[in-house]
Amino acid sequence: MLPAHQGRGLGKAIMHALLEALAAQIAAPAYVSLVADGDARHLYSHYGFRPVAPKSIGMACWLQPSISSSDK
């Protein structure tokens, strides 16, 4: 989140709405994971998220759009 928008409760509102929406859609307990960049881990910890390392590690890649056959 941009610094100008930090400290205004926006992250908390998003997390609350997201978790409420997820809970409304599941019929059994679900494993939910996320990537906490920088200090965001402090926000996420308020919602029960805990580090999973070294059991699991976050991984990422940049996926490029494929060229469709009509573009060739």
Image (cartoon, helix red, strand yellow):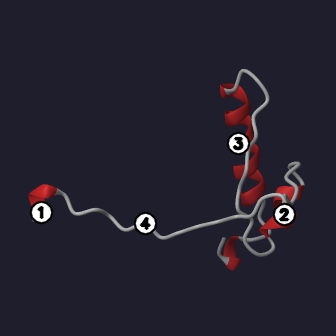
Q: Identify residue for label 3.
A: 17
Q: Around disc 4, counting alpha carbons within 10 Å, would you say few (fewer than 14), some (14 to 19), or many (20 or more)?
A: few
Q: Quadrant of the C terminus?
A: bottom left
Q: Amino acid at mark 2?
A: Ala
In this rendering, the label closer to the viewer, 3 or 2: 2
Q: Decide which of 11, 50 is in the foreground and name it.
A: 50
Q: Are marks 3 and 1 in contact (CB under 8 Å)?
A: no
Label 2 or label 1, whichever comes before in sequence order: 2
Residue plotted at (88% across, 56% down): 50
Q: Are marks 4 and 1 in contact (CB under 8 Å)?
A: no
Give the alpha-carbon distance from disc 2 to disc 4, as whole Å.
Answer: 25 Å
Label 3 or label 1, whichever comes before in sequence order: 3
Q: Around disc 3, counting alpha carbons within 10 Å, would you say few (fewer than 14), some (14 to 19), or many (20 or more)?
A: few
Residue plotted at (72% across, 71% down): 37
Give the alpha-carbon distance from disc 2 to disc 1, as whole Å.
Answer: 43 Å
Q: Identify residue for label 1.
A: 71
Q: Amino acid at mark 1?
A: Asp
Label 3 or label 4, whichever comes before in sequence order: 3
Q: Amino acid at mark 4?
A: Leu
Q: Secondary structure at mark 2?
A: loop
Q: Amino acid at mark 3?
A: Ala
The disc label shown at residue 63, or none: 4
Q: Are marks 2 and 1 in contact (CB under 8 Å)?
A: no
Residue plotted at (70% across, 27% down): 24
Q: Identify residue for label 2.
A: 53
